Amino acid sequence: MTAVLVVDDVPAMGEQYAYDLKRVGKFQTIVAGGGDEALDVLAREPIDCVVLDLEMPGTDGFEVLRRLQQRGIDTPVIVYTGTGSYDRCVQAVRLGAYGFVDKTEPIERVVQEIENALSRGRLVRELRTLRSRVDGEASLVGESAPMRALRDAIARVAPISSSVLIVGESGTGKELVARALHRRGPGEKAPLVAVNSAALPEQLVESELFGHERGAFTGADRLRRGAFENAAGGTLFLDEIGELPLPAQAKLLRVLEDRKVMRLGGDRPIQITARVVAATNRDLEREIAAGRFRQDLFYRLNVHTVRVPPLRERLADLPSLIGHLLQAIAVQLGVRPKTIEPDAIALLTAYDWRKNNVRELRNCLERMLIASDGPSIGSGDVPPEIRGDAGRAPRSTPGDEPDDDASAPAGTLKALKAQAEREILLAALETHDWHVTRTAEALGLADHSSLLKIMRRHGLSKGAH
Ligand SMILES: Nc1ncnc2c1ncn2[C@@H]1O[C@H](COP(=O)(O)OP(=O)(O)OP(=O)(O)O)[C@@H](O)[C@H]1O
Ligand SMILES: [Mg+2]
């Protein structure tokens, strides 16, 4: 129930408000006979909302608002006044009151104001947690040796304004590294402008990067600043630089050499003050050898190179990454966060994260979070394609009478046989796209129901069709 504090120096008035509010059925009320008493109550009791009289002898409503502000107490306050003076109400709002009502207005108006104030309070709190979480998400999680080395590299090159090339497989966190470089860089308060080179149509490269004057070409009906200019004093992040077409590479090179850009159709060179950070998941040296990337541009960009290690080289980070990502996903989707059981983490650790690294892990966790029924994510929720890869054990020959005791103590022949049987099943199911009849045939089983029986023993019936 919502606790409302009613403050009025006229006892009959305060009691009446408290009584009316209580009758609405949603509020629990406390009455204070003056400003000082109100401040005492607020320091002591968990109050959700205050209904405050402005005109009181001694510590009046304005003074209460001032003190609340000083003490950083953000309990919402609705003020009420009998004078009908609009100016005084505005003054109260400036002092932090959420809203005001006139004493002559019906109680419904007060209720409405209280409810609005409460829901705004909730939004403010939500926004605050979201902000802190989003900021948290932008940080690089992981304490493994490769991650520590990465953080060291970032700290070393961040304060220098020369170009940095970030290399690493897809989904390893290159963009996060670029943001970290910016945050710790010389232009931390200045903008970070990100340009996805892969999404730049060739005809637009120049106007996107360098801008254009009004009338520079048909359709250029107004002046447009380019990314270099917009990033002035900060960071220009050229993502997926390996995808930039060769003609655009030539233009970019010229600009980097001159440290000047000229808007299309313009005649005034503009000094470049942004630091350039580029990223790619391509092997640029190979691209150079194949004639797809200019060597001179490469040397301009990689004054410093930061390599982001693939996930499989830092599996020690998995538990903390999983925890961090689950939390971030829950916040993003607005669902209740879940914990994850150790055997599910073990399966995820055994997987070869080769395709999309942390992004693939993130997507997999999102699917698991949504698909799982209970309050925590278990090994049964790990998608088959992830589980199927986990720790391929030595194969025993099919045709060997499979042992059926999957719950035998670990290390015993029984348990090892059960484990091997599970691996064989998984591999066969994978091969046949989880098609039960075909898998049964391939394994030489009588029919699909014998396969289903074995699968159930291993808790594998979920993904089959
Ligand atoms: N060390 C990390 N800690 C926390 N989150 C991470 C980490 N590495 C990557 N992520 C998350 O993984 C996702 C992919 O990261 P990011 O977009 O930076 O990858 P990328 O290397 O730029 O990939 P691509 O080459 O596909 O552009 C993002 O959601 C990012 O927040
Ligand atoms: Mg990226």
Image (tube, grey):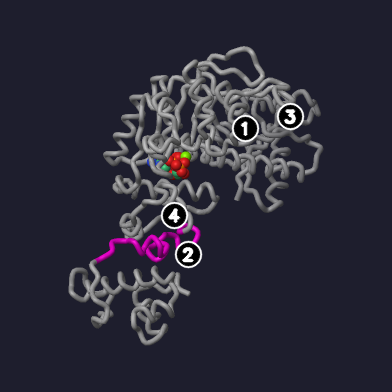
Q: Amino acid at mark 2?
A: Asp
Mark 1–mark 2 contact, CB under 8 Å? no
Residue 211 lies left or right of residue 445; in this view the side is right
Residue 188, image x, y percentages? 47, 23
Q: Which residue is mark 1?
A: 203
Mark 3–mark 4 contact, CB under 8 Å? no
Mark 1 and mark 2: Cα distance apart in space: 51 Å
Q: Which numbered disc covers residue 413?
A: none
Q: Which residue is mark 3?
A: 219
**Start-end of magenta stretch:** 368-393
Name the residue located 47 percent from the left edge and 34 percent from the top edge.
241
Residue 291, image x, y percentages? 43, 35
Mark 2 and mark 4: Cα distance apart in space: 14 Å
Farthest bottom residue in view: 446
Task: Report the front residue among 302 and 402.
Answer: 302
Q: Quadrant of residue 429?
A: bottom left
Mark 2–mark 4 contact, CB under 8 Å? no
Q: Residues within 10 Å of mark 1 (few under 14, many from 20)?
A: few
Task: Report the front residue among 229 and 254.
Answer: 254
Residue 200, image x, y percentages? 57, 35
Q: Which residue is mark 4?
A: 365
Q: Nearer the viewer, mark 1 or mark 3?
A: 1
Mark 1 and mark 4: Cα distance apart in space: 40 Å
Q: Which element carries disc 4, helix, strand or loop?
A: helix
Q: Amino acid at mark 1?
A: Gln
Q: Which residue is mark 2?
A: 373
Q: Which element carries disc 1, helix, strand or loop?
A: helix
Name the residue located 44 percent from the left edge and 30 percent from the top edge.
294
Residue 102, image x, y percentages? 78, 34
